[in-house]
Image: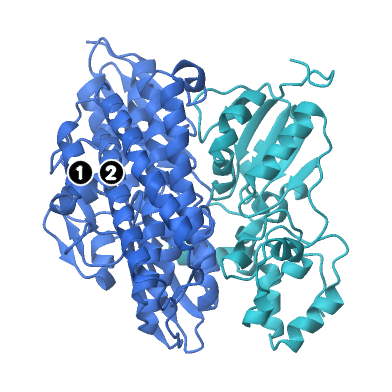
Chain colours: A blue, B cyan
Amino acid sequence: MKINLNVDVRHLSRVEGHGNIKIKVENGEIKEARWDTVETPRFFEVMLKNKHYSTAGLLAARICGICSISHCLCSIRATENAFKVVVPETAAKLRLLAKHGETFQSHILHVLFLAAPDFFNEPSVIPLIEKKPDIAAIAIRLKGVGNRLCDTVAGRTTHPVAFQVGGVTMVPEKNSLLGLRDELKRSLDDLQTVVDLFSTFTIPDFIRETEFVSLKGEKEYPYIGGSLISSDGVEHKEQDYQPMTNEYVDKNNTSKWSKLSRESYAVGALARFNNNVQLLHPKASEVATSLGLKSVCHNPFMNNVAQLVECFHVVHEAIRLIDELVESGPGETMAKVTPKAGEGVGAVEAPRGILFHHYKYDKTGRILMANCVVPTTQNNANIHQDIKSLVKKFAMTKEMTDEKLELLSSMLVRSYDPCISCSVH
Amino acid sequence: MKYLGIEPKKPKIAIFDFTSCEGCELQLVNKEETLADFLNAVTIVRFREASSSYSDDYDIALIEGAVSRNDEVKRLEKIRKTAKILIAMGSCACYGGVNQLKNEFDLKSMNREVYGNDPKETINVRRIKDIVPVDIEIPGCPVSKAEIESLICHVVWDSPFQIPVYPVCVECKQRFTTCLFEKGQMCLGPITRAGCNAPCPAGGSGCWGCRGPSVEANYPSFFSIVKEKGFSDIELRERLNFFGAFQEVNIS
């Protein structure tokens, strides 16, 4: 059987950052099947050096334009762990509320603006404004709710302003919180419409057994801090992240690669779901069941569905947090911070997966060493392995064309919601 | 559809990303109450972060990010040849942004530190205007969508485009935000160009000058206040250098 296929995507669209897909099949033999990140490195770990602790979170936020709240919170947590600062309860709740806002807006952006156009056979969400006005309106409305939640609690959605080492510098007014609560409640109907829409989509039937890494929830579905777990049974404490991530440099990629028990592993909504399914809000679990998502799921295309499931979870959790904050009233929001020599690690579940910041401080509170391990950095090797497996499974038929394979492999990469400039940092 | 006798133009816009976090591009799909109108007012022919369709036929190029590799220089020169109007969008494009903090370090040892024995290509960070002529600059980290919209009105209706000349302090007064100096924090608000609606001071954090100098900023007076309030030269210099927006200002 003489199958010849050629896919050469330079700078894949509808993802954050710059990455390439290259597939070459000659006479039925796979010559090449690659995913490579070619983003320009910014050297954040070097730029963080010698920075004062009060600046680190501000700088770290700039690693990513989509998940800046996660980077800022992770950076601040690393510093707080180094200085042994305990954040007041109200501040911790406000941070988590902002975190839920970010997860919501980021997942909506990905699921509806970046991934959904493939299922409608459209190049972007723009033609949908005319062709599917109801869906486009829902996408825009939901994105707005997520953004307003972030703006209200973090001061700004992209590059937050209300977080400092020790706590938060701003407390939203009760009426703003109650207004958001109404909006969140109303958004559940819109989300249900999205679920109905997703149940009509055909998700490619692609399985590749994968190791999934995430935070391990104790009492709650995890977002900020805690111990680490892999679906292959590896567990470590937060500060012992390095035996979990095992970063190394690949000659074709400006992003580093990671591995654990196998040649690569995956992080993100699907990993969180697979490792913490029992802690999901019951309403989110119902949605998972209705869309056929079951733990442990090894189909990377189902990450889109896992993100949608998490949207339900964070909306319900955000409503609960708002109720608690309104009930308790404004309490203490800033702990006393005394810099000291030492080191600290922060682990946070960013929308695209587990994120680590690790800093070593001198006694004046300036950074001596910084290391950041970013979700997509951990996913890149796994995407690369998936592409190879995808070509083996789907490409070796006469029906496959270059165009179909380009779409399928692009959809595979997109399902990871990669944040490439973030992964290179 | 004419409005007041003027036929609106529907310009073809292309959006390009260089060394950055792509957060400024993301602002383009924010401000949901006017998003559909915004997308109708222009023809977006290239927006890789949001669309798979692309064309090399465009009037306006919106550039996000700074330049930090040689292939970016070539890409930028090619865009300049096509674009009738080239707009630098965000602090990275206008000033180098936080990326230019790397210019304080030695490129070789920096590379070794991050990539070990497998160094990646990189050059010192440069602003867009260091490489090609820029027609309009919209600063901010990130840019404000409202300002992008006023720019769109400018290219669609020929209405004048002007970003504020006054400092951020004016917007703090409009929002009844307590001065950060009164709270014991440093703030570059008095010398930084407004237009962001001062979200940082309102959120309890002093301004870091991402929008660059306001027109006729009174530096000597500002520096003496900073000193009087007990902040060191190092603190001041770090803040002025953070986004690279005050490179032309001599502190001493």
Tell me the amino acid under the disc marked 1: Lys
Residue at the spot of label 1: A283
Work out whether disc 1 and disc 2 sit on a shared chain: yes
Side of A2 where B12 appears, left or right? right
Residue A109 appears anywhere in the view: no
Residue A84 appears anywhere in the view: yes
Q: Which residue sits at x=50%, y=22%?
A: A129
Please tell me which residue lies in front, B215 or B72: B215
Residue at the spot of label 2: A312
**Residue B111: image x %, image y %?**
51, 62
A85 relative to A1, above or below: below
Q: Quadrant of residue B219?
A: bottom right
Q: Which residue sits at x=55%, y=67%?
A: A47
Side of B207 where A215 appears, left or right? left
Q: Which residue sits at x=17%, y=63%?
A: A219
Tell me the amino acid under the disc marked 2: Phe
Are the two marked residues, 1 and 2, in contact with CB atoms closer than 8 angstroms? yes
Please tell me which residue lies in front, A330 or A310: A330
* Chain letter of the residue beneath label 2 in the structure image: A
Side of B230 where A405 appears, left or right? left
